[in-house]
Image (cartoon, rainbow, N blue to C red):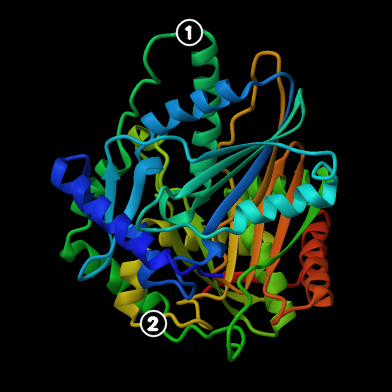
């Protein structure tokens, strides 16, 4: 509920931002291609909380509030996205980078009633879902909740406009280093990142000349010509939050999948994608399948320590053919994947080139997201502390159905994401069962059926 003094607060904020710019305490930068995607190529409003990336850590051991704040401050000093917000411009948003920032952090000692699991979950949801002020910033928040003297929950939420999956690993790594750095009483802060986020964005813009964008667009116009949508869009407003469900592929089946990948001279990603497209084809009755997959977009070592939204999206299109042996399908799908990645371009520019305008009920180009999550999440080791990480949301609620796979030891963790107004629990049960059946069948070389070739 808005209060009567909110307009005056916003005006005060604008005056303060103008003052920062005039005094040289903040600088303006053009947005990255990835950031533009949120404003120009997403069916979800950029200010919507579904664009939040959320996680929390359970920390067992003595950790003082002062040390917590000091560690976060060092990360804020090192990572400029934690000092970024967005200034509306005539043709789109501009990144506004402040020279300094203080931790957006709240410290809370939980009462006995607040320590109940349902109360903690309610509090976490409140932290995760509270909207950010994109103009005033900052676009992240940390909440430290002590259940006991040696029992801490550390919630972290960051807007997708300044973060991606890789960013979480960098945040955790920097936070751990900062904590040790502070305890060791080393002077100063953490060393600077090799390349700042705004510098990376500027370099990427320089690399994508109009002629290069046009060349790549020609490939995609031909490759995606006539690609069908898998289902009719739902009329009316869509659910903002995707339903999340987790399952696992046992170690023996995961081992077989990796063996098939090696025999086919393909990657684990291509092998799992071929199996997934078969399952989708069997479930929808369609043979022409397009999915979108995220790419880290951090091939240069200079940006691997940088927090920020660098990742992109690549459409992958295959024609499912039930007559091919699975090994042949994997090889064909792998060639398609390599070709598609070689021709990848900023997704926002691809959407504009194809003229596929997003609407609240229409994600451009694809309906399904498929991902093999391999961005590095470092092991958390802190002196005298035991830490456990929990992921909640990846800020990617722009599709209708998602399948995200992560190697978890010898098993594969499979996260299913779906819009409840399009699919119910039985639908997800069915497609998960089809996917599992395809994977289980890989241990039977003589068995055919449900394979894929490139469109």
Q: Residue at position x 34%, y 70% from top?
A: 350
Q: On the image, which quarter does residue 38 sit in?
A: bottom left
Q: Foreground: 240 or 224? A: 240
Mark number for residue 357? Answer: 2
Give the vertical position of 113 relative to 334 (above or below): above
Residue at label 1? Answer: 185
Q: Foreground: 34 or 23? A: 23
Q: Earlier in the sequence, mark 2 or mark 1?
A: 1
Neighbour class for label 2 at 10 Å: few (<14), some, many (≥20)? some
Q: Position of residue 14 (x, y in %)?
A: 27, 58
Q: Secondary structure at mark 2?
A: loop
Give the vertical position of 411 relative to 230 (above or below): above
CA gap, disc 2 to disc 1? 53 Å
Q: Secondary structure at mark 1?
A: loop
Is residue 377 found left or right of 411 in the rendered image?
Answer: left
Q: On the image, which quarter does residue 83 sit in?
A: top left
Is residue 144 found left or right of 2 in the rendered image?
Answer: right
Neighbour class for label 1 at 10 Å: few (<14), some, many (≥20)? few
């Amino acid at each position: 509920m808005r209060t009567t003094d909110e307009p005056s607060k916003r005006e005060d904020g604008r005056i303060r931002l103008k003052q920062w710019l005039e005094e040289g305490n903040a600088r303006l930068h053009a947005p990255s291609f990835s950031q533009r995607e949120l404003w120009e190529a997403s069916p979800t409003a950029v200010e919507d909380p579904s664009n939040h990336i959320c996680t929390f850590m359970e920390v067992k051991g003595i950790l003082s509030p002062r040390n917590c704040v000091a560690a976060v401050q060092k990360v804020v000093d090192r990572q400029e996205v934690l000092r970024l917000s967005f200034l509306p411009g005539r043709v789109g948003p501009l990144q506004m980078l402040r020279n300094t920032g203080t931790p957006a952090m709240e410290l809370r000692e939980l009462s006995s009633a607040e320590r109940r699991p349902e109360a903690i979950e309610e509090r976490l949801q409140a932290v995760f879902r509270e909207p950010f002020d994109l103009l005033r910033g900052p676009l992240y928040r940390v909440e430290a909740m002590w259940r006991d003297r040696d029992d801490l929950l550390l919630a972290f939420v960051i807007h997708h406009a300044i973060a991606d999956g890789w960013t979480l690993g960098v945040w955790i790594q920097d936070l751990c280093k900062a904590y040790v750095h502070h305890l060791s009483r080393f002077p100063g802060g953490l060393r600077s990142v090799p390349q700042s986020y705004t510098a990376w964005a500027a370099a990427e813009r320089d690399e994508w000349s109009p002629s290069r964008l046009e060349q790549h667009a020609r490939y995609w116009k031909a490759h995606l010509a006539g690609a069908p949508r898998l289902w009719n869009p739902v009329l009316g407003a869509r659910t903002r939050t995707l339903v999340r469900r987790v399952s696992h592929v046992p170690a023996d089946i995961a081992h077989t999948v990796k063996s098939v990948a090696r025999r086919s001279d393909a990657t684990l990603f291509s092998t799992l994608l071929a199996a997934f497209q078969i399952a989708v084809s069997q479930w929808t009755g369609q043979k022409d399948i397009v999915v979108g997959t995220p790419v880290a977009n951090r091939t240069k070592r200079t940006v691997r320590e940088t927090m920020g939204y660098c990742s992109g999206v690549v459409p992958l299109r295959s024609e499912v053919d039930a007559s091919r042996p699975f090994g042949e399908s994997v090889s064909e799908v792998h060639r398609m994947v390599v070709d598609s990645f070689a021709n990848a371009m900023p997704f926002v520019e691809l959407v504009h080139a194809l003229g596929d305008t997003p609407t609240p009920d229409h994600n451009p180009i694809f309906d399904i997201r498929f991902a093999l999550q391999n961005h590095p999440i470092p092991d958390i080791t802190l002196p005298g502390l035991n830490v456990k990480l929990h992921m909640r949301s990846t800020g990617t609620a722009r599709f209708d159905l998602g399948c995200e796979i992560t190697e978890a030891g010898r098993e594969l963790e499979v996260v299913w994401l779906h819009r409840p107004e399009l699919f119910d629990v039985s639908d997800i049960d069915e497609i998960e069962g089809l996917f599992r059946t395809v994977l289980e069948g890989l241990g039977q070389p003589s068995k055919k059926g449900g394979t894929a070739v490139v469109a």
